[in-house]
Image (tube, rainbow, N blue to C red):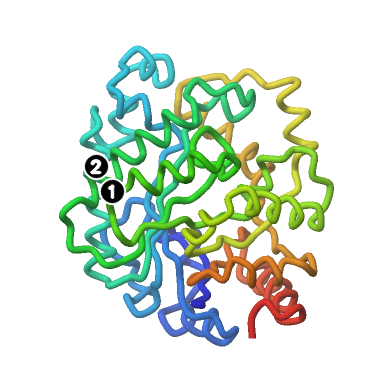
Amino acid sequence: MKTTINITATSQDMDRFADCETLKRFYSEKGIDGLELMLCGEKTFPEKITSNDVLGIHLNFFPSWLDLWNDDRQALIEEYGDEKIWTEHYGGKDKNALLTKWEEELEIAHQAGVRYVVFHVSECRLDECYTYRFRHTDEEVCTAACEIINRLLDKKPYQFYFLVENLWWSGLTMTRPQIVKDMMEEIHYKNKGIMLDTGHLLHTNLDLKDQDEGVEYINHILDKNGELCSFIKGIHLNQSITGDYVKKVIQNPPTLNGNYWQRLMQTYPHIFQIDNHKPFTADKVARLVQRISPEFLTFELITNNNAEHEQALKKQLESLKRNGGIR
C-alpha cells in the first residue's frame, strides 16, 4: 500500500514550501510515499513538484456539468445566465470543452508516469447543494460519466488506474450497489476502479453522531456492495460528522443572489461546513483500512497552514499506527 497526501498546484498550497526539498521532506519524513496532486487548470507541474513526487493526479471537476454534456441550453441559461459565463467556466461553449480539459490532464498524468488518476462522479447545481432536491438521477449522472470516461480512455495507451470517486450528491454515492456494478461494467478501460472517499460516504447519512457510528456505517455500505468492494483501489481518508448542520440548511435553504460567480462564491463556506476533511481517528478506522486493503491511501485533509497540517497528519498517522492500520 502506497500512502499520499493531497496537494494542489495553487499558490495557497505552493507558498507553504520554500522549494522542492522542503516539500519532499514534509511528507517523506513522516513515512509518506508521495503526493496526490490537483493541477487546478495548470498545464504543467508546479516548479516545487517533480514527477517523482506524484503518485496520483486528481482530475479537474465541475460541481455541475451534465447540462453542458447534454447540450441543454435552457438549463444552462437558468444556471449561468448567458453563454459567455458558462464558456468562461468550462473553457468552451459545448461538451468538447470538458473532453479537452480532461484529455490534457490525462496526457500530463501519462507523461509523468503516475500510478492513478481520480475522477469525480457527481452532479449538483448551486441551489441543489442547499436543498438536496436534485434535478438529475444517480443513473443519469453515472451513465453520462461512463460515456465521458470511455471517450477519454478508449484506444489510449494509458497504464495508470482510472479511479472514480464517490460523492454525496447525484451520481456515484456507493449507497446503491447496482449503480456501482453498472458503472464498473460500462467503463471499458481495464485498469478501472474506485477511490472511496470516507468523508463523502459519511455525508450520505445525516443521522450519524460520531466517528464510531461513521465507521459502522461505512462497514454497512461495504457489506451491501459485497464483491464490488474489490474495485476499491484507493481511499481518501478523512471524516466530517455534519448531518445536523445539513438538516438545518435543508429545512431553511438560503436564497443565493447575484450572478453565477457571486453565487458560486457564496456556496464555498457552506460546502466546507459539510465536508471539512478532518482526521479520521476512531479506533476501528485502522481495521476498516485493513478490510479494504487499498493500493493507495491518501490522507486527504484540509488545513490553513503547514503547522495545522502537521498536527492533522500526526493525529491521523498515530491513530492508524496505534491500531495496526499501517506500519
Do the residues under discs 1 and 2 have CB atoms within 8 angstroms?
Answer: yes
Callout 1, which amino acid?
Trp
Quarter of the picture holding the C terminus: bottom right
Is 184 left or right of 188, judged from the image as shown? Answer: right
Q: Could you say which disc has been placed on residue 99 in the image?
A: 2
Q: Position of residue 151 (x, y in %)?
A: 22, 43
**Dot label at residue 279:** none
| Residue wearing tag 1 | 102
Amino acid tagged 2: Leu
**Height in image: 161 above or below 18?**
above
**Residue 174 image offset from top left, x and y in percent:** 56, 45
| The quarter of the displayed image where residue 47 is located | bottom left
Which secondary structure, mark 2?
helix
**Residue in the picture at 63% in, 39% down:** 269
The residue at the point 40 percent across, 21 percent down is 80
Question: 259 and 192: which one is in front?
Answer: 192
